[in-house]
Amino acid sequence: MKLRFMSLASGSSGNCYYLGTDGQAILIDAGIAARTLRRRLKDAGVPAEDIRAVFVTHNHADHVRGVASVGEGLHIPVYATAEAHRGIAANRAVRARLTTSARLLRKGEAVDVGAFRVEAFDVPHDAADCSGYCVEALGRTFVFLTDLGHLTPLAASYAARAHFLVIEANYDADMLLHGPYPPYLKARIAGPTGHMDNADTADFLARRLPPHLLHVWLCHLSRENNRPDLALHAVETRLLQAGIRPGTDLKVEALPRTSPSALYEWEAATE
């Protein structure tokens, strides 16, 4: 058995992450259309028919735009908290209601889907009950922190369990400050329920890096207020200052915004 991970999209235009084993898979968010999702999986040699469930972080359009076409159109259960489901239903970007595919989850209570044990937890973001996710499969732990204004002790405690971490590095502070956004939007992004910037993420990783963490992917990079090279430089510089060697002690990559990432594979853990 192998564990596989792929980002299908990561940014303000859409977010969707694939996690699979042999013959079964789950998605974190469905911010792209089912047609696009199926094409990108097919191009990677991954059967869309393996998908057993979608787990939604929150109701913003870039995370749920395609959730009805995936859930209802492909008959795949869509898990979210009750408040997040209400937010999805009220979102005009979601063109159909989730009816037969809607499933409820509660934060802090694990949901078992095939080989995957999935647990949602609270993160601070200005959406309807935003969740991070901790996913255990084949002896490995993935943690997804895709939208949050700051790292709370609770979110940090889940990140400390990760072998693999997908974490937001949304903006570069100087680019946001001098960029085209109006003041109210800049304040919202930089606020405690907005998004994390490159320096925030870099500092957290340098100070709270669990010894078993193998790979970090920087996600949800802003098109207008960030660049992959800036995000990577910020993180790698801060890690080196803490005595951590990127590429040797830990792999760090920035996920592409509008195109798929590579398909990553690992053998099941033996211990």
Image (cartoon, rainbow, N blue to C red):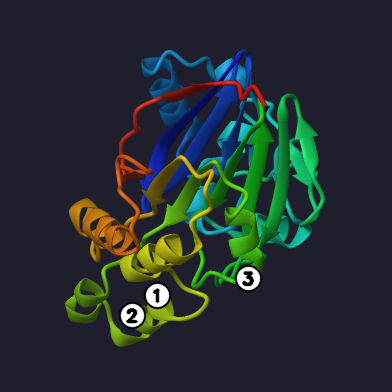
Q: Residue placed at 74% from the left, 55% from the top?
A: 81
Q: Position of residue 52 (x, y in %)?
A: 68, 26
Towards the viewer: 138 or 57: 138
Of pointers 2 and 3, the one earlier in the residue sequence: 3
User: Where residue 194 sits: x, y (%)?
Assistant: 47, 73
Mark 2, other Cα within 10 Å: few <14 / some 14–19 / many ≥20: some
Residue picked out by circle 3: 153
Q: Dot 3: within a 10 Å radius of its alpha carbon, few (fewer than 14), some, or many (20 or more) residues? A: few
Could you say which quadrant of the image residue 223 lies in? bottom left
Q: Looking at the picture, which amino acid does disc 3 mark?
A: Pro
Q: Earlier in the sequence, mark 3 or mark 1?
A: 3
Res. 186 mark:
2
Q: Give the spatial CA distance, label 3 vs label 1.
A: 21 Å
Position of the C terminus, as image quadrant, is top right
Picture coordinates of residue 220, whole percent (x, y): 39, 54
What residue did someone put label 1 on? 189
Question: Quarter holding the N terminus?
Answer: top right
